[in-house]
Amino acid sequence: MYVLYGDAELFLPYSESLKEKRKHIQSITARIRKRFNVSIAEADCHDLWQRSILAFAAVCSSNAEAELILQAISETIEQHEDACQLITFNHQIIKTVSADTRSRLP
């Protein structure tokens, strides 16, 4: 089992209000949730209307699936390039030991 988590910092240069920013952020997060079973939310910069930090996490059965989800998150954000720019995209994939494997350990 693999756990992936990370964050994406976004710059919304054309956003002129918090309401407009939230509209774009909700569109991005809804599309990512709909496409994959990923937990994603705005984690910081709630009161800034031209900046946002989205945090995400997911559990996957393989490393390939985790990489696919990371690619999909990045591509989904890039599809909204008319509204936002991706500044940073940090992520980590951790391999965990399953309960089955633990029971076989001495």
Image (cartoon, grey):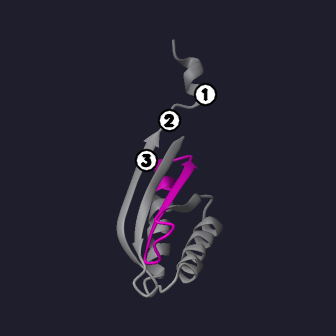
Q: CA distance from mark 2 to mark 3?
A: 10 Å
**Crowd tier of the residue under label 2, counting other residues whose Cα lies within 10 Å: few below 14, some 14–19, many 20 or above:** few
**Crowd tier of the residue under label 3, counting other residues whose Cα lies within 10 Å: few below 14, some 14–19, many 20 or above:** some
Q: Is residue 56 found inside the magenta-colored segment of the image?
A: yes
Between marks 3 and 1 in the image, the one whose residue lies nearer the viewer:
3
Identify which residue, 102 or 91, lies in the foreground.
91
Q: Which residue is mark 1?
A: 99
Q: Which residue is mark 2?
A: 96
Amino acid of disc 1: Ala
Q: Is residue 61 above or below residue 88?
A: above
Q: Quadrant of residue 91?
A: bottom left
Image location of residue 10, percent across then percent down: 41, 72
The single residue placed furthest to the front in the displayed view is 47
Q: Residue drawn 52% across and 57% down?
A: 56
Image location of residue 94, percent across then percent down: 44, 42
Q: Is residue 81 above or below residue 61?
A: below
Q: Is residue 78 above or below residue 90?
A: below
Image location of residue 37, percent across then percent down: 63, 58
Element on which disc 3 rests: strand
Q: Quadrant of the N terminus?
A: top right
Image location of residue 46, percent across then percent down: 51, 67
Q: CA distance from mark 3 to mark 1?
A: 19 Å
Which label belongs to residue 45?
none
Q: Which residues are magenta?
A: 44-66
Amino acid of disc 2: Thr
Upstream in the sequence, badge 3 or badge 1?
3
Element on which disc 1 rests: helix
Q: Residue drawn 47% across and 51% down?
A: 5
Element on which disc 2 rests: loop
Asked if the residue under mark 1 is in contact with the one under mark 3, i.e. CB atoms within 8 Å, the reply is no
